[in-house]
Amino acid sequence: MGKAGSRSHTDERFIQLKNWLVDDLGLQVRSLEPIANDASFRRYFRVHLAKTTCIAMDAPPAHEDCYAFVTVAKLLRQAGVNAPAVLEQERAQGLLLLADLGRRSYLDAIAHTDVDTLFTDAIDALIKWQLASEPGRLPSYSQDLLQRELDLFPDWYLAQHLGLELTAMERDGWQEVCARLIDSALGQAAVYVHRDYMVRNLMCCEPNPGILDFQDAVYGPVTYDIVSLLRDAFVSWEPEREARWLRYYRSRAHQEGITVAADADEFARQLDWMGVQRHLKVIGIFARLCYRDGKSRYLAETPRFFSYVRAVAVRYSELDGLLQLLDGLQQRHCSKQSRP
């Protein structure tokens, strides 16, 4: 079976996947090509058949929920958005066979393609996804969930990566910041939220874009996905370009009846604060990936997120406490590093 027989893939889960494809589904598999894994426990393989390719997903049931993936894929496709069709499934074993959306992600394409066209397509797809929103179809982006995400920052980045614990005063300040960010998020209109809508998860294909990595979708703040797209984990944009894309999103949202803040300044504040919540969460996740899961490469991206957070915090007096907290933690860390 070509690449499927390579020594690096003789693990038990791979053998189970191969047997499902060949024995249970009866596919004439020419080779299985590993695809770069994401930040989860899932693995993907491009299945080469005689005349086409598809994608096999290995999602260990102890760690991943295939049901959520199948559910959200169906919602996306019903919304008219290009998510991969689920061709076959064995959810009890954590195995899915998906349509192949190609090899070229937005992250790969942005250096060689008209990015305005790419991002217009991405915003149009996001509008379709938000227009399809119905309460009760996806888990709620609740206060508890928002707080658990924020807690990743002190629990993993500060404690595990920097070896720092918040003092009582710092913890009070942190909780005050968290409360403001959460209140802002919950005060927005609720829509379907992809939760990781960024260039790495968007594929250049027809119709454009293809959308991946959506299994954690929830029902929550309307600004979450647009700030995820424009203030990305792996690429930053100049302010003028970001502002132009935001104007386009806001105009399209108003045209289609999606509830975003009518006042431009209030919309900007909601988006900024939603971004801070996400960026603090992601910093914590990147530290967790390093220290729990052995995936250290993500930590190199944390300076980008601190830059996002600081750029917002300096614009709002309500977030002065966050700046003070970050400055104090930086001083303590530097002092700790300088000790003999």
Image (cartoon, grey):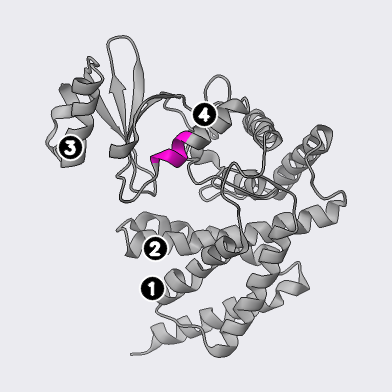
The residue under label 2 is 288
In primary-sequence order, the first of circles 4 and 1 is: 4
Measured in 3D between alpha carbons, the distance from the residue under mark 2 to the one under mark 3, in whole angstroms, is: 26 Å
Left or right, 316 with reference to 340: right
Secondary structure category for the residue under label 2: helix
Residue with the mark numbered 3: 9
Q: Position of residue 59 (x, y in %)?
A: 33, 41
Q: Of all residues shown, which one is farthest toward the right? A: 263
Relative placement, left or right, of 339 versus 31 is right
**Nearest to N terminus: mark 2 or mark 4:** 4
Residue placed at 43% from the left, 59% from the top?
286
Which portion, as a residue range, is magenta? 66-70
Residue closest to the eye, 6 or 18? 18
In the picture, the disc for residue 200 is none
Q: Secondary structure at mark 4?
A: loop
Q: Pointer 4: what residue?
A: 83
Residue 122, by quadrant, is: top right
Please identify, in this view, whether the residue under mark 4 or under mark 1 is nearer the observer: 4
Q: Amino acid at mark 2?
A: Arg
* Callout 1 crowding tier (Cα within 10 Å): few <14, some 14–19, many ≥20: some
Q: CA distance from mark 4 to mark 1?
A: 36 Å
Distance from label 4 to label 3 (Cα)? 27 Å
Return the residue at label 1.
160
Q: Are marks 2 and 1 in contact (CB under 8 Å)?
A: yes
User: Which kind of residue does numbered mark 3 sit on?
Assistant: His
- Percent x, y of residue 291: 33, 65
Q: Secondary structure at mark 1?
A: helix
